Image (cartoon, grey):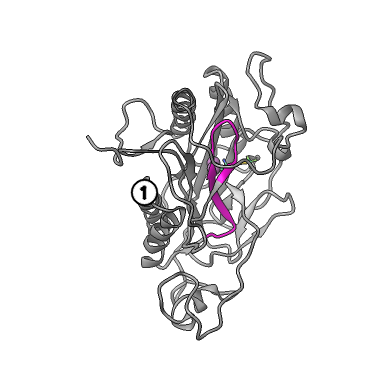
Amino acid sequence: MKEHTTTRRAPGRNEPCWCGSGRKYKKCHASADAPGRRAAPAGGLDLRVGDRVRPGRVSPPRPLPATIVRPPYIANDGEPLQARVPARPRTPDEIARMRRAGRAAREVLVGLGDHVRPGITTDELDRIAHEHAIRLGAYPSPLGYHGYPKSICTSVNEIICHGIPDDRPLADGDIMNVDVTLYLDGVHGDTSMMFCVGEVSPDCRRLIAVTERALLAGIGAARAGNQVRDIGKAIQQVAEADGLGVVRAFVGHGVGPEFHSEPTVYHYYEPDARARLEPGMTFTVEPMLNLGTWRHTMWDDNWTAVTADLAPSAQFEHTILVREDGVELLTVVEGAEQPFLAG
Ligand code: MF3
Ligand code: CO
Ligand code: CO
């Protein structure tokens, strides 16, 4: 996801809440917005995870055969050629290529499930994904993007996103998001999901289940004719009904020939996101939900985003296509269900 940096002035306590509920701010999101808030119930959460995650050793970037076509930013020091690329409906040919890129990314992601177990390092998962991408003829988009050093993102426990694979072995009770983006045939497919390592606490299982439900609610709201803000509204409703925090600093994004383009897809209700969703648009929905506060801090590596209270975080991501007849999931394996298409 992209980092989203503009911030909103908090409303006055007696002003209408920013979320559009129509209630006064103090009766609605004031306490949820307050710094240092912890959602932990009395007695604390039963997290059953070990100590906080510490930065480990990162292995050198992995090589690729010269036959793998690099995305354009690789020839430009990892910087995209254009900072802000407007949203544009895709051509039928681009859509056909995005189905292939999306399917390839999902295959690599799902394939990692066979390897997740206590003791394996996230660096080994990175190697497995990297080699799988090469076998599919694809470039692992994160590698070198804005200087990112590895081929996938692995975000364990309190890591919200952009965790860098390293030599930390996974431990019993860990939860982990793995985010795979592949560049194939000139377009990107971007997808992520959660994995449980051994026996995971009930609170973490609930966090993961609600986050996946929030993703699907958001995708369901991405129908042609709706507005971008309907997506975040649906996600936020699912999250807050369960008392979970919605991360605001990282957003979904247009995806296609560019890794990140417009539209910016907020995962919370953003009243100003009035852009209409049109057939042919492709973008990601990738909500990050937290067991505690939605606020984050950054590791010194300037990539790894962690929850401010170190409570666990979960995320799921699909690349989707808005169609006249519904919403198509592009990041699915061959023959997968399409719950948002008629028929
Ligand atoms: N795949 C991430 C997303 O969902 C982006 C990762 S960029 C990286 O947008 F540089 F951190 F890899
Ligand atoms: Co993304
Ligand atoms: Co992603």
**Which residue is at 53% across, 84% downward?**
13
Q: What is the x, y in percent for residue 257?
A: 58, 30
Q: What is the x, y in percent for residue 193?
A: 46, 43
Quarter holding ligand 3 = top right
Residue 148 in sight in this render: no
Q: Nearer the viewer, residue 74 or 194?
A: 74
Give the left or right position of residue 237, taking residue 13 as reference.
Answer: left
**Which residue is at 65% across, 40% downward?**
166
Q: Nearer the viewer, residue 116 or 247?
A: 247
Spot the residue most to the left.
343
| Other residues around mark 1 within 10 Å, as few (<14) / some (14–19) / many (≥20) | many
Q: Which quadrant, please, contains the C terminus? A: top left
Q: Amino acid at mark 1?
A: Leu
Q: What is the x, y in percent for residue 180?
A: 53, 35
**Which residue is at 76% across, 31% downward?**
76
Q: Nearer the viewer, residue 42 or 317?
A: 317
Magenta residue span: 247-262
Pointer 1 residue: 216
Q: Is residue 30 magenta?
A: no
Question: Does residue 259 lie above or below 313 as drawn?
Answer: above
Q: Is residue 260 magenta?
A: yes
Q: How many marks?
A: 1
Secondary element at tag 1: helix
Spot the residue most to the bottom.
14
